[in-house]
Image (cartoon, rainbow, N blue to C red):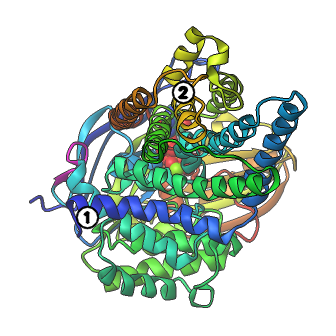
Amino acid sequence: MSEYSIETINIRRTFKIDRMARKDAGRILVALDDVNLQVKPGELFGLLGPNGAGKTTLIRILSTLLSPTSGEAYLNGIDAINDLKRVRPIINTVSGGETCGYGILTAAENLRLFTELYGIPWKVAKPRVEKMIHVVGLDKFKGVKVNKLSTGMRQRVNFARGFVTAPKVMFLDEPTVGMDVNAAREIRDFIRNWQSENPDCTILLTTHYMAEADELCDRVAIVDKGTTQGCDTPAALKKMVQKETALELTISGDEPVPEHWHSFTGIVKLVATPNPSEKVTGIRALLDSADASGRFINEITSTGRLLLDLRTSEPTLEDVFIKMTGRRLTEVSDSKPGSEE
Amino acid sequence: MITGVRYFLKVALARAYVRIIGAQRELSWIIGDTLLPFLSVAAYVYVYRAMNAPPEYTGFVILGGIVVTFWMHMLWSMGMQFFWEKEMGNMALYLMAPLSRPALLLGMAIGGIFMTSTRAIMIYVASRFLFGIQFNITEPMMALAVSLATLLALYGLGMMLSSLFFIAGRGIFYGMQVMMEPVFFLGGFYFPVKQLGMMVATAAAAIIPVSLGLDALRQTMFGAYDSALFTPKTELIALLVMGVVFVYSSIVILHKMEAVGRREGKLFLKNQ
Ligand SMILES: Nc1ncnc2c1ncn2[C@@H]1O[C@H](COP(=O)(O)OP(=O)(O)OP(=O)(O)O)[C@@H](O)[C@H]1O
Ligand SMILES: [Mg+2]
């Protein structure tokens, strides 16, 4: 058996764009471009990447719902592309923001249904169902039909649904997407606890929240435009930008910033995100030294644009992403005040 | 882990259970699925009475009304089941699981038959109570055999449609609508199908199992032998053959569709 719990070899997936749907119809879209991953047993591995990076596509391939255009994948040594019968019993997936099952059944009945679909005998499944109901905090709602539960609770039922089959390899696709800060924290705590109680369960988690990857994952790979890079512990990745300072600015005007700002002395990488509705532009810049910031701010004001806000911070995984790709993880308009990013 | 036949049955029953328990917990279907069909049955009864049609026509209409509920259910619930599952987000979860796909189809059909049968009984009881029907059951065993064979053929067709529409998008709604009305006519739900002429009737019977089933039931339960298409025995055999062919094709098609869907990225809604 392979020493890895998840191993992908040159996984590639293309889609043909639908004929009528778009103007670039007929074009081939490369969703994944030779992805190579090696995840060790019991690891919590994160894929950090922006919208459209290919995260969900990779998870669909690994969870047998989509075949790759080319490449190989192995889960606990089993061929996940061809040996579906053997690989399916050991995997499961939870996608954040989704619900599952039938509104007409209670949470416990839905969980039981899914254990039956996995051929788990009721005497094994029963204690698990009870435990999962408790773990996701639904004890009080045990006998309530799912269509009477709030969306948040139904998402928790869906979480329980994924774990109740005790998968050896678990895929979590943006598990906290769209959740408020507290709900997201509960989910993260749950994932951490699950792994400490089930040390042989390998988890592959995708996210576009850099804090989530940083806080939760043993190792992280950066995904962008269908390729992965980096692939190291969050601490090691952040070392790549350790010597640098991150500067977060808001300046007036939503017109594009001058081209030469990107190559301004002392600037390693700069991303400008215009916000037309407020007629401002957000800038995140990685500087190689603290005194470069003074010169850069002078440069900005000399163009007549006003400096509305300025913050410096320790470089984060987001800056690793910026350094590698020249783009931000999330659109600035995406991170509303109060959200975690 | 449970394996083999036990696993197959467990999956089928687990899926059927959702339907069966659902019917008991939410009773709103009684209005939509029983009262409304009953009203359309009643309309035909009065039309026939006004025309001084023979009294057994009341029975035909009620029988037709009952079969209509089966047909509608087969189309909208069974035939479109995978579409609904996809909309609800369950489809990917089912397909990711190691379960047998035909077991899932079978479970849907069992649950469906259970649900529709309760409806049929309610329509029957209400009609009988209000209009009175005179049965003339000439061949009770044959009547039973024909009923079961009709269910087999009908739900076999449902399984096949479900498989055919496995990876279909929303366009399937139009397809279903198109199928509904002409089939009501060709299927002879409210009149002996032979009145359409032998050619049309045979052609209709070849694709719409309920039309054969109805014809056989009219003969065995009402003694309506003059207006019959074929003998009940011929119709029984035809229904059984249809049932087996439909069920078998549904399994073949389903596996094929899943393979295509997996290759083309159609097993899930795109924007998730
Ligand atoms: N079934 C499909 N047909 C056509 N294109 C697809 C399909 N599935 C995904 N894509 C395209 O592949 C690319 C990668 O999509 P994917 O959903 O994997 O990204 P993601 O990283 O999960 O992003 P998100 O944050 O939006 O979930 C996108 O450009 C997407 O439009
Ligand atoms: Mg995604």
Q: Quadrant of the C terminus of chain A?
A: bottom right
Identify the element where label 1 is drawn.
Answer: helix
As rendered, which of A323 and A90 lies closer to the eye? A90
What residue appears at the point 69 percent right and 58 percent down from the top-left corner? Answer: B122
Q: Amino acid at mark 2?
A: Ile
Q: Is residue A298 left or right of residue A320?
A: right
- Residue B156 highlighted magenta (yes or no): no
- Residue A80 highlighted magenta (yes or no): yes
Residue A50 seen anywhere in this rendered image of the structure: no
Residue A159 seen anywhere in this rendered image of the structure: yes
| Residue with the mark numbered 2 | B208
Quarter-of-image position of residue B219: top right
Q: Amino acid at mark 1?
A: Arg
Quarter-of-image position of residue B24: bottom right
Residue A331 position within the rendered picture, expressed as x and y whole percent measured from the top left: 66, 50
| Highlighted range, magenta | A78-83
Identify the element where label 2 is drawn.
Answer: loop
Q: Main secondary structure of the magenta part?
A: loop
Q: Chain of mark 2?
A: B
